[in-house]
Image: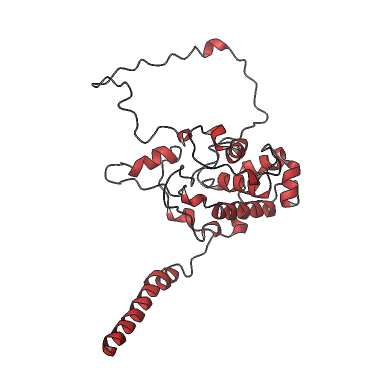
Amino acid sequence: MERFNFIFIVAGILFFTLAFVIMGALPLAQYQGIDVVSMDQIATNIPYQFDELARDYPEAFEKAFGTTEPTAEAFKEALEAGRQAYIAEACWHCHTQQIRRIDPNDGTEVGHDVSRWAPDTRLESEADEYHNAMNYPHLFGTRRVGPDLIRSSGRHSNDWHLAHLWNPRETSPYSVMPPYTWFFDDDQGKVPNARGLGMVTYLQWLGSWHTQFAPSEYEDLPRIHFDESWYPPYVPPEVQPGEDGDPYAEEDPYGSSEEDY
């Protein structure tokens, strides 16, 4: 009996050592010598939405970050606060940060990922998107109760995000996301605190390296006379019933709009 105990103990130690090497040492060795994008480098490309936060919520912004200016230091502080809040509130339980692959042979998508979450970039997630200080560890997530967020930058305004955090069903009627009222300092959802501002900064940063949607305000643009005749009333197309009589039988089973979530 003692002989078998000795064998089990030695086998256990060997398997533990093997697992440590494969799961820990080898991945670390693989990335040795590769430069990681630092927070200082990330802060050289500040999304315009951060400027809007500083301008639209000056008092809350100053209280949160000690300045009314959208500086690089304030941006780094907001990003880290947002990421910490994202982890602490377990947002990664219901949101992923990964656009799954496109089959190079026939161009089909896994789970309609590109069409649903990256229609503007038409790109699946790539390794270099995660090779920065904000993704150590990266937050791929485990399931999609809510939409994927890796390309969320600019898809909604700052105010949309704040309204969604205060009461998700104000912006997404079928959302199952709980309200995060503790991201605000008042009882009406109009004064975001450091965590609220940080969360919006973080969401607007995700994917900003791929695209910067047009800012909500433009300067020095010529004013064009508006003529209502240019836009005739919209007439919805007539929907033909399917074989079983259901006119919506061919509708996308995954849902066609991000607002569904």
Residue with the most extreme bottom position? 2
Give the vertical position of 29 relative to 108 (above or below).
below
Residue with the most extreme top position? 229
Give percent across and percent down for residue 229.
53, 10
Q: Please give the name of the residue rendered at 67% of the width and 39% of the height, measured from the top-left corner.
A: 52
Q: Quadrant of residue 227?
A: top right
Front-most of residues 234 and 107: 234
If the image is split into quadrants, where does the N terminus sit? bottom left
Q: In which quarter of the image is residue 122?
A: top left
Q: What sort of colour scheme is used for the picture? A: secondary structure
Instruction: Please count the marks in the image.
Output: 0
Give percent across and percent down for residue 146.
46, 42
Answer whether residue 170 is visible to the viewer in this image.
yes
Is 129 displayed left or right of 199 in the figure?
Answer: left
Is 207 displayed left or right of 241 in the figure?
Answer: right
Q: Please give the name of the residue rendered at 29% of the width and 89% of the height, measured from the top-left corner.
A: 2
Give the vertical position of 90 relative to 236 (above or below).
below
Front-most of residues 130 and 220: 130
Give percent across and percent down for residue 107.
31, 42
Q: Please give the name of the residue rendered at 34% of the width and 17% of the height, measured from the top-left corner.
A: 239
Residue with the most extreme left position? 243
Is 100 displayed left or right of 186 in the figure?
Answer: left
Give percent across and percent down for residue 77.
66, 54
Front-most of residues 244 and 203: 244
Answer whether residue 69 is visible to the viewer in this image.
no
